[in-house]
C-alpha cells in the first residue's frame, strides 16, 4: 500500500512539474529564437481564435446588445476585422508579444522566466503565467493541456 501511495505521489508531482518544464522550454526557445521548438509549444490556431473572440467581446461591450442598425453593423465589422487581424498571428508575433520589456545591451531578448511574477494552475488543464507586476500592465500567458502536452494558447495584455 505504501508503494501505491508513493507511486501516486510521484505521478502528481510529475504532473505538477510539467507546465513549469514547458515554460522553461518556451523561455529557452524565445531566447535562442528556435522556431521549430516554438512551433511545437505554441498553438497558433488557438491564439488566432482567442484574438478574434476578444475583439468581438470588446465591440459587444462598447456597442451594446442591439440587434439591428448601427450596432449590428459594428458587430459584423468587428467579427470580420477580428478574423482578419488574427491572420497576422505567427511565431514572430508571439515572440514580440512575449517581450514584456525592452532588451538590455547585455541580452538580445529578455528572459520570460526572469520577468515572471506568477505561475500556477487555473484548473487541471489550464496554467496561467503573469509576466510583469500588476501595476505595470503585465502580460498574462495561458497554457492548456492538449494531448498530454502543454501548449501556449493565449496571450492577454492588461
Image (cartoon, rainbow, N blue to C red):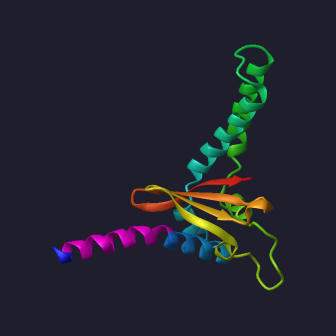
Of the 4 image quadrants, the one containing the N terminus is: bottom left
Residue most extreme to the left: 1
The image position of residue 69, as x and y in percent, is: 78, 14
User: Which quadrant of the view contains residue 85?
Assistant: top right
Compare residues 2 and 24 and report the one nearer the observer: 2
110 up-or-down from 65: above or below: below
Q: Which residue lies at the image location 50% right of the left edge and 73% below the top edge?
A: 21
Dominant SS type (magenta):
helix
Q: How many marks?
A: 0
Residue with the most extreme top position: 68
Residue at point 74%, 65% (across, down): 133
Q: Above or below — where is 145 with respect to 82?
A: below
Q: Give how far across and how far down residue 7 sits, in percent.
A: 25, 74
Give the residues in magenta: 4-19
Q: x, y (%) of residue 4?
A: 20, 72
Residue 148 location (% of width, % of height): 39, 60
Given residues 114 and 109, the one toward you in this image is: 114
Magenta segment: does it hold 18? yes
Q: Quadrant of residue 12?
A: bottom left
Viewer-nearest residue: 83 or 154: 154
Amino acid at each position: 500500500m505504501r508503494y501505491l501511495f508513493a507511486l501516486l505521489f510521484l505521478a502528481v508531482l510529475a504532473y505538477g512539474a510539467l507546465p513549469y518544464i514547458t515554460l522553461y522550454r518556451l523561455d529557452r526557445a524565445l531566447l535562442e529564437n528556435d522556431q521549430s521548438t516554438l512551433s511545437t509549444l505554441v498553438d497558433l490556431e488557438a491564439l488566432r481564435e482567442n484574438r478574434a473572440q476578444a475583439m468581438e467581446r470588446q465591440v459587444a461591450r462598447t456597442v451594446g446588445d442591439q440587434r439591428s442598425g448601427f450596432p449590428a453593423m459594428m458587430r459584423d465589422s468587428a467579427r470580420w476585422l477580428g478574423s482578419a487581424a488574427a491572420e497576422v498571428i505567427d511565431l514572430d508575433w508571439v515572440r514580440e508579444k512575449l517581450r514584456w520589456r525592452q532588451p538590455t545591451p547585455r541580452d538580445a531578448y529578455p528572459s520570460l522566466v526572469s520577468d515572471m511574477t506568477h505561475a500556477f494552475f487555473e484548473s487541471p488543464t489550464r496554467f496561467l503565467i503573469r509576466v510583469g507586476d500588476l501595476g505595470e500592465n503585465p502580460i498574462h500567458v495561458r497554457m492548456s493541456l492538449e494531448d498530454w502536452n502543454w501548449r501556449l494558447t493565449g496571450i492577454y495584455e492588461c
